[in-house]
Image (cartoon, grey):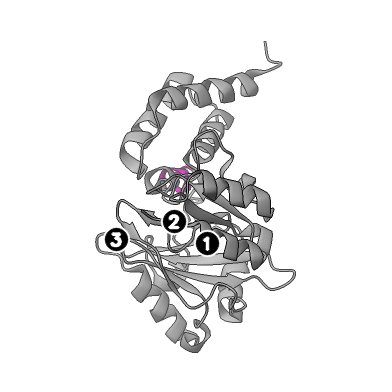
Amino acid sequence: MVNHLERALKLQKDGFFIYPLASNTKVPLKGSNGFNDATNDLETIRKWWTDEPSRNIGLMLKQHNLIVIDCDNHIEGVNGIENFKAIAAKYNGLNTLNTYRQITPRNGIHFIFKLPVGVEIEQQQSIFSDVLGTEKTGIDVIRYGLPLAPTITKNGQYKAVGELTNIEPLPQWIVDLLVKDKPVYTTNYGRQTGKKYTGKFLDELVKGCEDGNRNNWIMIQISKMLAVGADLDTIYKLILVVNDNFLDEPIEVKEITATFKSRVKKHTKGRD
């Protein structure tokens, strides 16, 4: 039987804020707050993994000012690893990637870096699309919760390359590419050629939530649709479609319904 207690205690000793994931998944415990529950408290961590040693381990990245360049290799026709290496070579940065890494169950790679002081980069998808000249790059930024090796899922196990205590600063060439202003260009006819909010939002829905915290992700998507005035019936049906087709592990419908009702109640509170 898998026992992650020793690993969890080692992470606590090294100063990391961690939280439990359900056994054999990347999903936080039912009823928990996911990465928002992350702690370095010894007794809490000991209890979490004594109660159920097979629980997987999540790391709260923002607590440590960490950033993950997530290179996917499971999207048909898109190899995020090769794309990232090509960009690194273009900017003479191949020798800057020697940081702690994780090989994911579907043969992707997580490159984990420390953000430089004063630099803020948010979670985002398909980065470097302007450099590669393609919409789908297979390269994302993760800033919140991350499953840590040796987490095991139905697709396999996360494998560490190096030590988590040996994390390098985010290379300057990546900083320069990610924090630069990216204006939306228009033609002389006033037609927008950059991707609009709706396009980005639809991409986000189809991308789904692969790294846990599904309930919080669903709540955010419902809130976004409420904010733009979509019909309640439309929102509910679309969220069910997303849940069934674009999440690695769908949430029970009763949980979806409860979250939907909660967000609608909050959104309409105080209105006629």
Predominant secondary structure, magenta span: helix
Question: Is 85 drawn above or below residue 74 in the view shown?
Answer: below
Q: Secondary structure at mark 3?
A: loop
Q: Secondary structure at mark 2?
A: loop
Give yes or no for contact between labels 2 and 3 (Cβ–Cβ under 8 Å): no
Question: Is 223 drawn above or below residue 114 in the view shown?
Answer: above
Residue range of the region highlighted in magenta in the rendering: 198-202
Q: Which residue is mark 3?
A: 74
Of the residues shown, which amino acid type is indicated by label 3?
Answer: His
Q: Is residue 182 visible?
A: no
Q: How far apart, in angstroms, are the residues tagged by discs 2 and 3?
A: 28 Å
Quarter of the figure that contains the C terminus: top right
- Along the horizontal axis of the image, is 233 left or right of 9? left
Instruction: Give the mark nearer the N terminus: 3 vs 1.
Output: 1
Q: Which residue is mark 1?
A: 6
Instruction: Give the residue furthest to the top.
Output: 272
Q: Secondary structure at mark 1?
A: helix
x then y, percent, for residue 89: 43, 86
Instruction: Give the mark nearer the N terminus: 2 vs 3.
Output: 2
Q: How far apart, in angstroms, are the residues tagged by discs 3 and 1?
A: 31 Å
- Along the horizontal axis of the image, is 116 left or right of 158? right
Q: 10 Å neighbourhood of mark 2: few (<14), some, or many (≥20)?
A: some
Give yes or no for contact between labels 1 and 2 (Cβ–Cβ under 8 Å): yes
Question: Is 193 drawn above or below residue 78 in the view shown?
Answer: above
Of the residues shown, which amino acid type is indicated by label 1?
Answer: Glu
Q: Which residue is mark 2?
A: 3
Asked whether 248 falls inside the magenta stretch, the response is no
